[in-house]
Amino acid sequence: MSDVDDTRARYARFASDEAPGRSEVYRQWAEGVAADEEILAILARLPSPHRQPPVVFAVTRMLGSGEGSYAEWARFVRNNAEQVLAECRDRSTQTNEPLRCAPLTLALARVRGPIALIEVGASAGLCLYPDRYTYRYGDTAALGSGGVELVTELRGDVSAPTRLPEIVWRAGVDVQPRDARDPRDRAWISGLVWPGETERARRIDAALDIAAADPPLMVAADASEPGVLEDLVGRAPSGATVVITTPGVLPHIPRAERARLIRTIADLPARWITIDHASLHDAWDPAPEGERGFLLALDGRPLAEVDPLGGWIAAL
């Protein structure tokens, strides 16, 4: 398949399967790209990971395209093609959704504290603050008293956690970590929110304020490379249980590096919490039965089926 045909198929699939119900603006833009030979030829010049619709659309909005019609957006891309391509080559998907802390907190409740928390693919670190948010699990009473309220739906026989984790140290590792104190980085993280997701935008902006007020340790590195996680685990305070989280990041790591990362985590004196699609790897223990979507797991043991962004938690 040529780069143009790959780009066409990717945007057509995004328009039909991913954008509907979340962002009408993005649906229209993706549908327009799939039928526009000139724009397809421009975007096909990008390396495959950097031509994903959410990345390209977020970059153009950051550069000033606005959120108007497809014709307006396409005109902006044609007039600013080199700048758009340069920014896209330097960026990748860095979805930083604090709502993922709702399922993460459910798993953290099973870990003895105090906890030293390490996140792989941390972006701006918004999932490193599960102790700073307020949670509403279904109809249960609010848990916590933070300034950001995270609401998630419970489906089936799932018990909400009754306590927040005791986090005494937090660190993130990312190939391109973002700083919540930096206006440009904040604009990028906020720009990854799709048009129309108003509540999500407010949640992420408030979480960025929390991260900016007390920045975590952030390491710019590939966590799958030898020594990276070993060094971070060695820097954790003595007496704390080290917990490594990989919420939603593993699909963005090539298969060989992904397998190496999972083996590395298994060999470390640390617990592992992940949110992954059931088909993504073979590290589940036991292997999930039947057709499953995204799973929340502790040390490879599935605890629940979850929305990949944390919007609901369902009993297995």
Image (cartoon, grey):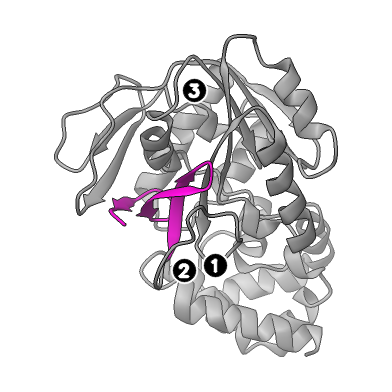
Which labelled disc corresponds to residue 288? none
2 or 3: tag closer to the N-terminus? 2
Q: Calculate the distance from the C-alpha at mark 2 to the C-alpha at mark 3.
A: 30 Å
Q: Determine the secondary structure under disc 3.
A: helix
Q: What stretch is highlighted in magenta?
A: 293-316
Q: Name the residue under label 3.
A: 210
Q: Calculate the distance from the C-alpha at mark 1 to the C-alpha at mark 3.
A: 34 Å
Q: In this view, does 258 lie to the left or right of 165?
A: right
> To which quarter of the image does residue 268 belong?
top right
1 or 3: tag closer to the N-terminus? 3
Residue 91 screen position, x and y as percent: 74, 52
Which amino acid type corresponds to the residue marked 3 in the rendered image? Answer: Ile
Which labelled disc corresponds to residue 279? 1
Q: Is residue 81 above or below residue 246?
A: below
Q: Determine the secondary structure under disc 2.
A: helix
Q: In what quadrant of the picture does the C terminus appear?
A: bottom left
Q: In this view, does 65 lie to the left or right of 89?
A: left
Q: Which of marks 2 and 3 is in front?
A: 3
Q: Name the residue under label 2.
A: 25
Which amino acid type corresponds to the residue marked 1 in the rendered image? Answer: Ser
Of the pair 242 and 284, the residue shown nearer to us: 284
Of the pair 56 and 177, the residue shown nearer to us: 177
- Residue appearing at x 62%, y 90% in the figure: 35
